[in-house]
Amino acid sequence: MCRNIKMLFNFDPPVTDEEIRAASLQFVRKVSGFNKPSKANEAAFLTAVDEIAVVSARLLGSLETNAPPRSREEEAARAKVRNAARFGTGTRD
């Protein structure tokens, strides 16, 4: 899974349309292999981003859980700890 795509379900405050679109853009970039498509592929690329954003919003709206909503700050802190363990905390020269 692409590490840049963040989990969006069950957060307080709830996910925004911008966050859904950003995740959709990352997904299309990963699948297509394009960071920025050529003019010839731009329409198809943007259509895919829009369609995935709609489907993702529908999915997130239909999911249910009994778990309490996660805190964005706590999840960010956990990610920082995971990254430090994975990549080290030293500085590069």
Image: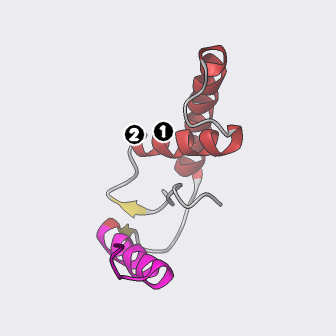
Q: Main secondary structure of the magenta part?
A: helix
Seen from the viewer's position, the closer of residues 92 and 74 is 92
| Label 1: which secondary element | helix
Residues shaded magenta: 73-93
| Residue carrying label 2 | 18
Q: Amino acid at mark 2?
A: Glu
Residue 16 is situated, as x and y percent measured from the top left of the image, at: 38, 45
64 versus 75 height, above or below = above
Kindly identify which residue carries mark 1.
21
Does the magenta run of residues contain 63?
no
Residue sitting at 55 percent across and 61 percent down? 3
Image point (34%, 73%), residue name: 93
**Tags 1 and 2 in contact by the CB under 8 Å rule?**
yes
Is residue 90 a member of the stretch shown in magenta? yes
The answer to whether 76 appears left or right of 52 in the picture is left
Question: Foreground: 41 or 75?
Answer: 41
Residue at x 58%, y 56% (from the top left corner): 63
Q: Which quadrant of the rendered structure holds the N terminus?
A: bottom right
Q: Quadrant of residue 29?
A: top right
Instruction: Return the x and y of residue 23 as percentages of the image width and height.
Output: 51, 46
Rounded to the nearest whole Å, what is the CA distance between mark 1 and mark 2? Answer: 5 Å
Residue 50: image location, x then y, percent: 56, 29
Q: Amino acid at mark 1?
A: Arg
Describe the element under mark 2 as helix, strand or loop: helix
Q: Is residue 66 above or below residue 19?
A: below
